[in-house]
Amino acid sequence: MAVRAGSEPPAPQPTAPEATNLHGIAAEIAELRHISSEKSRRIQAITGQVKILALNALIEAARAGEMGRGFSVVAQEVRNIGAEVEGVAKALEVELSNRIAGLQTRVRNFAEESQTERLIDLALNAVELIDRNLYERTCDVRWWATDAAVVDCAAVPSPAAAAHASGRLGIILDAYTVYLDLWLCDLQGNVLAHGRPDRYPALVGRNVAGEDWFRRAAALASGEEYVAGDVACQSSLNGAQVATYCASIRAGGDPHGAATGVLAIHFDWQAQARAIVDGVRVSDADRARTRVLLVDAKQRVIAASDGRGVLEETLAFTPKGRPSGADLDPRTGAVTAFHRTPGYETYAGLGWYGVIVQGDPR
């Protein structure tokens, strides 16, 4: 079995500011449109002056009679050229205005699409980080369920065996700071030993047979399988938010031997998940209007960058079977971008989503 150990979630990867650059391009295009409009009006103003001068010249030529006839021809040509230049200027203004307006629309749409794709990527980044972290938890629990002290205590429970197992579990907890406690249970759900008796006294002898994670773990077919429980508050751990992972303990440490107990490891969910949602790279300008979330398969919020609604709020978004996407709320202008867990190696994920909710910047 491949085993990966670690105490900290990987650092989120930086993202490129494509949308910011595109907004800069859109601003430049708007400035060009303003300049072309100003120049076009200037040309029309000049041609207007030329037309007035040509008209005055024609009047003076008419007064001069026969002697002004040649000048009259020149004045008429100047007048015609002025009218032609005016027509070209107007046509240029219309064409440039239309094309620039179309380009502005395309750039704006592309900027919005780019920003949406970036939010989806950020959502994926968040859920991928937690997937990789939790994959290691599945390896940990299967590995530690084969520890000799754990196997011996489950096979022949006694005060001495429980004390030895408790000491061994405590050593593991000292090295793996992402856990709150490790529980060794018999097949009836009685806690035989755990790693932190000083922090959580009176756990030994407590029965956890009613816990969903225990019932599922007791039914596992081999030591190669594991159970990943839903994130929940564990009353026996002072109400802490935990993600519980379980494996069955097998006789002699043989993954295909008879089941003799269950090892449950309680991952310190709140601290680790909050580090991930807080670490997603959102610009300072967007941070105040952005929520970075992890939600479970029932769309219950299990981590939030603003700390609101954790384990209480059900997020109102509708994936409709899509692995990823983004939806715009027409009432508020808020965008909800999401990506479903892709899983990691042997950890298939639990149908969770990374979600970014970003309000309208206006």
Image: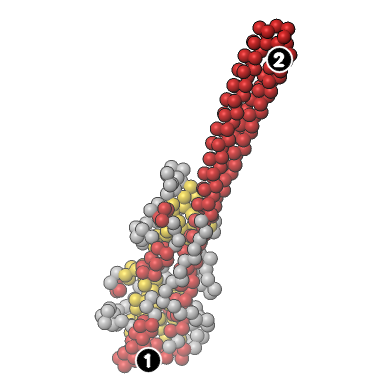
Q: Position of residue 49 (x, y in %)?
A: 59, 21
Q: CA distance from mark 1 to mark 2?
A: 124 Å
Residue marked by disc 1: 156
Colouring convention used in this rendered image of the protein: secondary structure
Position of the C terminus by quadrant: top left
- Assign a secondary structure to mark 1: loop
Going 47% across and 76% down the picture, which residue do you hit? 136
Task: Answer with left or right where residue 278 lies relative to residue 351.
Answer: left
Residue 200 picture quarter: bottom left
Q: Position of residue 180 (x, y in %)?
A: 34, 76
Badge 1 or badge 2: first in the primary sequence: 2
Task: Answer with left or right where residue 71 lies relative to residue 291.
Answer: right
Pick the front one: 307 or 300? 307
The amino acid beneath tag 2 is: Phe
Residue 351's place in the image compared with 268, above or below, is above
Residue 353 in sight: no
Residue 225's place in the image compared with 113, above or below, is below
The amino acid beneath tag 1 is: Val
Task: Answer with left or right where residue 42 lies relative to residue 149.
Answer: right
How packed is label 2: few (under 14 Cα within 10 Å), some, or many (20 or more)? some
Q: Position of residue 44 (x, y in %)?
A: 60, 26
Going 44% across and 78% down the picture, which residue do you hit? 6
